[in-house]
Image (cartoon, helix red, strand yellow):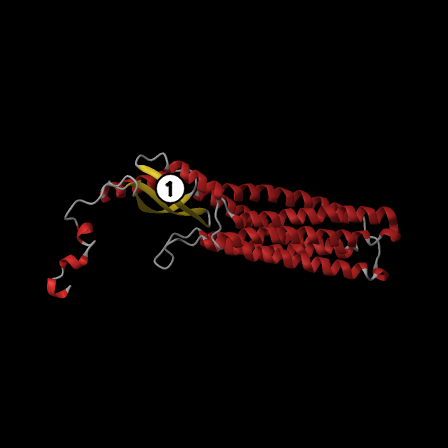
Amino acid sequence: MSSKIDEGIKSVAIGLLANAFLAGLKITTGILGNSFALIADGIESITDIPSSIIVFSGLKIAQKPADHDHPYGHGKAESLAASIVSLLLIIAAFVIAKGSMTEILNPATNEPPKWFTLVTLVLVVVIKETLFRRIGSQGEEVKSSAMKTDAWHHRSDAITSGVAFIGICIALIGGHSFASADDWAAFAASFIVAFNGANMLRTAVGEIMDKQYPIVNDKIKEIAMKIEGIIDVEKCYVRKSGFQFLVDMHITVDGNESVQKGHDISHKIKDALLASDLQITHVMVHIEPNTLNALPAPEGSAKNSEKNPEEKLPKDKK
């Protein structure tokens, strides 16, 4: 798992360098080629640079082992990074929408973009889609919301560049009459970027708020019910922290079993879950006795002796 995470971090670093290069290329080409869609695309790429730095830092922190102050590890740093990046994506969408609408409402400044802007856009789409597929698949493999959010940053860039390509083609073919097609393309792309940002933010916040994972929950119960001595899984709560899951569960065992037996059963289920492929790193098991088949406490036991406390009192104190 550690090696896969390291590979993902390397991919994020490569994406960071690509963002810096493409941001400069798109803004320069957009200015020289009179394309606001390309300039807006470059602005969106600039926001990718700090977001990639945040993702990179979040992943590095999330890898740190648990310590005295953080007994459950540092995994939440990864979800926090994903939340910040998602917000940056939404802000970038607002900047693009505002800028493109300004151009649309000011047709006097509209001039058709130059043809060479299309070459830059094709290059951007190829590079960004490649980064999306690589980082996205790695993020899916290690269950990293930050990496998947970063991947969608690249996909959003590819989408905005693709839409800008269409808008510029229309502007080039139609001439001055369709010069604003380039700006409308940028405006339409801003909604795509905003939608993806909001979707990624919802996922990241869900992880921070300890949302449940029904599929993982069902697999945990399936593993637990195979352990000898477990009658039922009464409760099962699953939290995601970084790349791993934390589990709290209540299991029902025979009420006549000894404390030692219940302890052994809890260790069996814990070992089974830690050895599974569910990426679980922490398991807390609470034992519940099955009262339906529990025998009554023997006469004279502590349980029975506490039923009628008045019987213990001297007659003059009753």
Residue sitting nearer the eye, 122 or 253: 253
Residue sitting nearer the eye, 203 or 126: 203
Can you see residue 296? Answer: yes
Task: State the residue position of label 1.
Answer: 233
Residue 40 quadrant? bottom right
Query: Where is residue 99 drawn, in percent x and y?
Result: 74, 60
Query: Where is residue 249 drawn, in percent x and y?
Result: 37, 46
Query: Which residue is drawn at the image coordinates 51% and 45% (left, top)?
Result: 8
Q: Is residue 209 left or right of residue 118?
A: left
Quadrant for the N terminus in the image: top left
Query: Where is residue 209 drawn, in percent x and y?
Result: 49, 55
Q: Is residue 19 left or right of residue 317?
A: right
Residue 259 quadrant? top left
The answer to whether residue 224 is above or below residue 73 is: above
Query: Where is residue 141 drawn, in percent x and y?
Result: 50, 41
How crowded is the residue under tag 1: few (<14 C-alpha within 10 Å), some, or many (20+)? some
